[in-house]
Amino acid sequence: MLAGVLKAALTGCVLVMGVADADAGEKARQTPVMAREDAAAGIRDSLARADALRGARRIDEALALLRKARDAARKAGEKALLYKIHVRMGGLDLARGDSGAAMADFDAARKTARELADAGKRPALWLHEVHACYNRIGDIGMNLRGVEQAGAAYQAGLRVARRMVALEPEEAEWKMDLVRSLGKTAVIGAGPPENLDEALDILRELDKKGQLTPARRFWAERIRQALSRLKRKRGK
């Protein structure tokens, strides 16, 4: 009888150990996913707190928080969040007057967005962010009177915009990105004046399709004014 009791006890222990091992194995399989989800939640919380700090004009504290979030995003492989962090850092560096750091931030954001575009199912969405970063870099360069540097950024943005339109020719927002790049390159002399004519043709096409919103009409007027100025310069 004692032998039977011992056998039953040992069998029970084996079964319990087997269940425990199975539970441990399941937890081990879940841990990487759970850890990444927890890391992403923490990063998003840091972004929200950094936004609040910026609103309170506590720029240095916000930047310190974002640097930690940036390191966490890199470690967790959260590239979409990493992109957002770099963009926010760029805005904060601009707010404190550090144009060089801001350009580095936006360039880091550009590289991250490019990686996401190359890996994504709909690359044009992230190419749109790449284009935005090139524009920010170019705008900062113009503010620093670095026309050559700004021109290089605007030209790169123009190439990206053309790629976006080629990928999704019916997307009106991508065409507006192309209009902006055509205008920026022509106005600073980084592209031919004919870029403005091309921009106006795109705007006319959008107008025919009923896609020229008030904001886009504003761009149409800016392009016309820029083209008029260039023509007057040619006349001189």
Image (cartoon, helix red, strand yellow):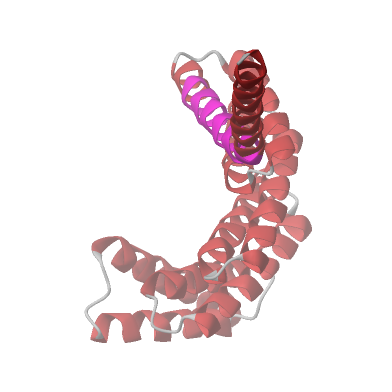
Can I make out residue 171 in this image? yes
Residue 211, image x, y percentages: 26, 75
Residue shown at 55%/70% (left/top)? 121
Q: Is residue 40 magenta?
A: yes
Q: Which quadrant of the rendered structure holds the N terminus?
A: top right
Q: Is the magenta stretch mostly helix, strand or loop?
A: helix
Can I make out residue 229 in this image? no
Q: Does the magenta stretch include residue 4?
A: no
Residue 120, image x, y percentages: 59, 66
Residue shown at 33%/86% (left/top)? 205
Q: Which quadrant of the rendered structure holds the C terminus?
A: bottom right
Residue 95, image x, y percentages: 58, 27
Magenta stretch?
Answer: 29-49
Residue nearest the viewer, comparing 171 with 137: 171
**Position above or below: 23 against 154:** above
Residue shown at 50%/15% (left/top)? 57
Residue nearest the viewer, comparing 196 with 129: 129
Residue nearest the viewer, comparing 135 with 121: 121
Query: Which image quadrant for residue 87?
Result: top right
Residue 22, image x, y percentages: 62, 36
**Position above or below: 92 against 79:** above
Residue nearest the viewer, comparing 69 with 144: 69
**Position above or below: 53 against 119:** above
Query: Which image quadrant for residue 187?
Result: bottom right
**Position above or below: 135 against 227:** above
Question: How many numbered marks have been drawn onto this rendered protein structure?
Answer: 0
